[in-house]
Amino acid sequence: MKIIKIASQMQKIALKHIKDGDEIGLVPTMGALHEGHISLIAKSVKNDDITIVSIFVNPVQFCPNEDYLKYPRPAKKDKEICKKNHVDYVFMPSANDMFPSDHKTFIEIKTLQDILCGAFRINHFRGVATVVAKLFNISCADRAYFGVKDFQQLKIVEKMGKDLNFRTKIIPCSVVRERNGLALSSRNSYLSAEEKKRSLNISKSLKEAAEDFKSRDLNFVKKTVINKLKKIPGSEIDYAEIVNFDDLSPANKNTKKAVFAVAVWIGKTRLIDNIMMIKDKGRSGQ
C-alpha cells in the first residue's frame, strides 16, 4: 500500500494503471474510517484491479460554525485499516493542494442541493460536488463507491456524473448499521453513551414507517415519525421528509417507491438517516 499526498502524483499513477488496462475503484472518505467505509472498500477490492481510498476532510463542504477543525482525523488508524483491507493507494492531500488560494471553480446541482440537508447547510453540496469531481479526475476511477446513508449526496453525485459525462460509474452501497440499528457515522463518536441510546429511536421509527407506508396514508406515516422523534429527550428535528426515490421530489399518493429521510440533532450532534419505502401492490394507502 502506498500513501500519496500530491494530487498530480496520484493522477499520474492512476493514468499509468489505466494505460496498463487496470480498472480503478475509488472510495471517497473524510477519514475516521469505520465498518461502513470498510464495506465500501471490500466492494472495490472485489470489483476492481486497483483500489484508491481518498482521505480528505474537505473544508469547502463545511458551513460556518460547523465542526471542520474538530472533525476526527485518526490518520494512523485509518492507514492501518486501509492496509489491513488490501487498499492499493491512500490519497491524503492537503487542503492547499486541493483548494489553493486562487481556486475559483465550483459545481452546483440546482434544486437537488437546496432541499433536505441543503436547506440547513448552505453551500454544503456545492463543496461536496466540487471535491468529488476533482477526486474523479485525479483518480481516473472506473467506479466510485458511496453509501446510501447519505442518500441526498448519492443522488447529487449521480446527477453530476450524468450531466458532466464522467466516465466514473457510481456504485450505491447499503447502509451499515450497528447491531442495535444505529447507522454508522464518524460523528457517532461525538455521542455520549446516553445520547447514543436515545438515538436508536431514529432508525426504529424509520423501520416502522416503512411498514406503515405499505398501506397507510403519507401524512399518517410522516406525522407518526415526527411525533416519535420529538419525544426523544434532547432532540431537535431539522427535517423529516418523504421523497421520491429517483429525484428527491416530494412524494405523493401515487408514489410507489420513496425514501423517508431525516436529520435530527441529539444534543450537539447532528445525525442523518433514511429508509427506502415501497408501497404494497394494489393498495393506494389512501
Image (spheres, rainbow, N blue to C red):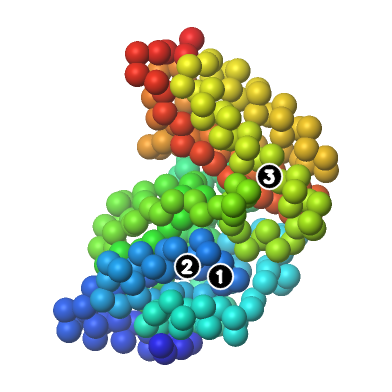
State the residue position of label 1: 33
Q: Looking at the picture, which amino acid does disc 3 mark?
A: Leu
Measure the alpha-carbon separation of dots 3 and 2: 22 Å
| SS for dot 1 | loop
Q: In this rendering, would 178 be left or right of 1?
A: right
State the residue position of label 2: 38
Quadrant placement of the N terminus: bottom left
Residue at 70% x, 63% y is 189
Q: In this rendering, would 14 be left or right of 151?
A: left
Q: In this rendering, would 208 be left or right of 269?
A: left
Labelled pair 1, 2 in contact (Cβ < 8 Å): yes
**Residue 250 seen in the current view:** no
Measure the alpha-carbon separation of dots 1 and 2: 7 Å
Residue at 67% x, 60% y is 187
Along the viewing direction, whichever of 57 and 265 lies nearer the viewer: 265
Q: In this rendering, would 272 be left or right of 7?
A: right
| SS for dot 3 | helix
Residue most extreme to the front: 179
State the residue position of label 3: 200
Nearer-N-terminus badge (1/3): 1
**Residue 284 seen in the current view:** yes
